[in-house]
Image: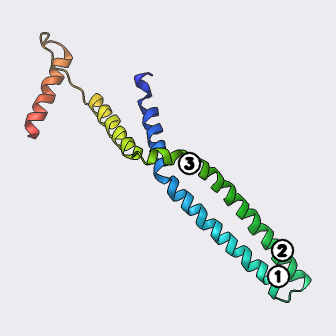
Amino acid sequence: MQIDDIDEVEKFVEKMNYFFTNIERTNSDLKNKLRTKELEQDDLLHEIELSKLNTFELAKVATRLKKTRNERREIKDKLEFISTLKGFSDKYTNKLITGDFINLLKNIRTLREKWNTRIYKTRVLEDLKISKRGEENEKDIHNNQ
């Protein structure tokens, strides 16, 4: 791994943290959407069963029922996928991996800040440009205190 990869690693850790943090919420949201679609389906079926519908009205309800069933299928497919991911994530969420991700992100950002604010004070060669920059930084530090 090269040092230039720090941005890529940080993005990866952010995505993993998001994954582990939101998988349960996503699962719950999909289950709620599925329940709603099933209730819509029941409403439409009861409309067919209990209402006296003409051919046109029956066709409209059937079209809505088909659309609702297709939407329900999409939700069930997503839920099946999330359940597969959740089986994986549950093993690690119990070990508080999200806290580890947060600490890792903090450490990466601290390291980047350290690299961006690095100063060096020359020990022997005072005529170098970096010597004067080190003196300016020291004055700034003392003035801010």
Asked whether the residues under the numbered discs 2 and 1 touch, taking CB atoms below 8 Å apart as contact, a structural biologist would say yes
Callout 3 environment at 10 Å: few (<14), some (14 to 19), or many (20+)?
few
| Cα distance in 3D space between marks 2 and 3 | 37 Å
Which label number is shown at residue 62? Answer: 2
Residue placed under numbered mark 1 in the picture = 48
Q: Is residue 105 above or below residue 139?
A: below
Kind of residue at disc 3: Gly
Kind of residue at disc 2: Ala
Image side of residue 143 versus residue 93, left or right = left
2 vs 3, front mark: 3
Residue at figure coordinates x 87%, y 77% from the top left = 59
| Cα distance in 3D space between marks 3 and 1 | 39 Å
| Cα distance in 3D space between marks 2 and 1 | 8 Å
Q: How far across and how far down the image is residue 36, in percent?
A: 64, 71
Of 23 and 132, the residue lying toward us: 23
Residue at figure coordinates x 20%, y 17% from the top left = 129
Quadrant for the C terminus in the image: top left
Disc 3 on helix, strand or loop? Answer: helix
Q: Which numbered disc flags the more N-terminal residue, 2 or 3?
A: 2
Q: How far across and how far down the image is residue 110, in percent?
A: 29, 36
Q: Which numbered disc flags the more N-terminal residue, 3 or 1?
A: 1
Which label number is shown at residue 82? Answer: none
Q: Is residue 35 above or below residue 4?
A: below
Residue 57: name its quadrant. bottom right
Residue placed under numbered mark 3 in the picture = 87
Image side of residue 67 versus residue 116, left or right = right
Q: Is residue 95 above or below residue 2?
A: below
2 vs 1, front mark: 1
